Image (cartoon, grey):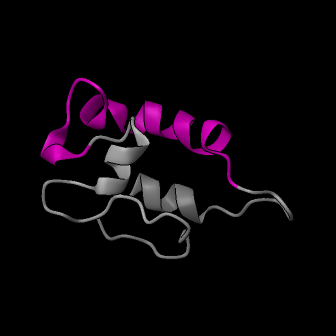
Amino acid sequence: MVLALMLSLPLGVGDRPDYARDSHPILKVRCYSCHGDKVHMHGLRLDRKSDALRGSDSGAPAILAGSAAQKLAF
């Protein structure tokens, strides 16, 4: 839910989302304890782009690159 909310927040006019500035700080605080480098609950790892885009053991994607308007149900 946090990821879907984060991706739906409006940016300023002309601003492009930046992972280091916009996403990483939120994921680090809210997600990495369960989906980081040491723990991968449900096979979901969010600290590496390739793993985050792969999704979880269920096959459900956690991130849909380029589609912030599509919110995922968690």
> Residue at the top extreme?
38
At horizontal 34% and vertical 58% (from top left) the residue drawn is 62
Determine if the magenta segment contains residue 29: yes
Q: Is residue 14 left or right of residue 72?
A: right
Q: Is residue 29 placed above or below 65 in the rendered structure?
A: above
Q: Is residue 36 placed above or below 15 in the rendered structure?
A: above
Q: Which residues are magenta?
A: 17-44
| Residue 45: percent from left, percent from top | 28, 40
Quadrant assignment, res 41: top left
| Residue 34: percent from left, percent from top | 25, 35
| Residue 1: percent from left, percent from top | 38, 58
At horizontal 18% and vertical 63% (from top left) the residue drawn is 59
Q: Is residue 13 placed above or below 22 in the rendered structure?
A: below
Q: Is residue 1 left or right of residue 55?
A: right
Determine if the magenta segment contains residue 32: yes
Secondary structure that dominates the magenta span? helix
At horizontal 28% and vertical 37% (from top left) the residue drawn is 35
> Residue at the right extreme?
13
Q: Is residue 63 left or right of residue 19?
A: left
At horizontal 43% and vertical 53% (from top left) the residue drawn is 2
| Residue 24: percent from left, percent from top | 54, 37
> Residue at the front extreme?
50
> Dividing the image into 4 quarters, which one contains the C terminus?
bottom left
The total of numbered circles placed on residues is: 0
